[in-house]
Amino acid sequence: MKKMPQDAESFIEEQKRRLMENPECATSSYNLGVALMEQGRYDEALEAFRDAVENSGRMFEGWVNIGYIYYLKGDLEMVVEANKRAIEVEPRYARGYANMGFAYLQMGKSDEAISALKKAIELNPKIVQAWSNLVSAYLQKDMVKEAIETGEKLVEIAPDFPLGHNNLAVAYYSDEQYEKAIEHLDKAIELGFKPHPAFVKELERYKK
C-alpha cells in the first residue's frame, strides 16, 4: 500500500468540503475514495466510489476500485460485477477482463474465466497475469495441450516471470513431460518463486 502523505487527513477533509458545496462532483468523490482506500478505510471508500460512478457515466476507474475493494473483502461475485460495469463504460479496458477472469478462476467457473482472459490478452497481450491465469483455467478444465501452448507463449513474452514458469511446469507435469516440468520449476525457483512443497516433492521422483 502506498505511503500516505502527511496531510492525508487534510486532503480528505478538503474533498468532503468540496462535496458539501457540490455533492454531485464525481471527481471529488473519486479523489475522496482513493484517499480513504489508501488509508484502509474500505467501507467509506466504497461509499465515495459509488457516489462517483453515480454522478459520472464515464467514471470507469471508480468501478475498478470498487472491484478491488470487493476483492480485498473476498467477495468474488462483486469483483466480477464491478469489472463488468467498468467494461460497459470502457470496452477496451483489458485489465477489467483480466480481473473478471481471475475472479471466475477462483470461483471454479473455468469457461467464463477462459473467455474473459482471452479477451484481456486480445486487448493487451502484455498482461502477464492474464496469460498465467489462462494456463490455470485451461488446467482446471483438463485442457492440458492448450495450457502448455499458453504457458510457452507466456514464458516467451515474459522469461523472467516466475509464476509463468511454475504454471508451465504444472502443465508439463499434467502431460507427463517430467523433464520439462522440472526445468521450468527450477527456473521459477531460480527467479525467486516459492512453489508448493508437495509439487517440489512430487517432481523429485523424476529427477535423474
Image (cartoon, helix red, strand yellow):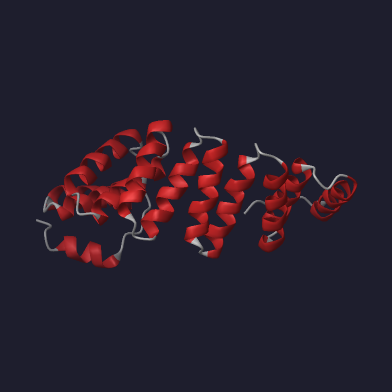
As displayed, is residue 167 above or below residue 94? below
How many circles with numbers are drawn on the protein? 0
* Residue 127 seen in the figure: yes
As displayed, is residue 68 above or below residue 93? below
Picture coordinates of residue 69 (x, y %)?
A: 59, 57
* Residue 124 seen in the figure: no
Picture coordinates of residue 71 (x, y %)?
A: 52, 58
In the rendered image, the residue lying farthest to the left is: 208
Picture coordinates of residue 115 (x, y %)?
A: 34, 43
Could you tell me which quadrant the N terminus lies in? bottom right
Picture coordinates of residue 191 (x, y %)?
A: 36, 48
**In this view of the protein, which residue sits in the foreground, 17 or 55?**
55
**In this view of the protein, which residue sits in the foreground, 205 or 26?**
26
> In the rendered view, does 32 fall on the left or right side of 117?
right
Which of the 4 image quadrants contains residue 56? top right
> In the rendered view, does 138 fall on the left or right side of 81?
left
Could you tell me which quadrant the C terminus lies in? bottom left
What residue is rendered at 61% in x and 49% in y? 65
What residue is rendered at 45% in x and 49% in y? 100
What residue is rendered at 24% in x and 63% in y? 199
**In this view of the protein, which residue sits in the foreground, 48 or 187?**
48
What residue is rendered at 72% in x and 50% in y? 51
**In this view of the protein, which residue sits in the foreground, 108 or 175?**
108
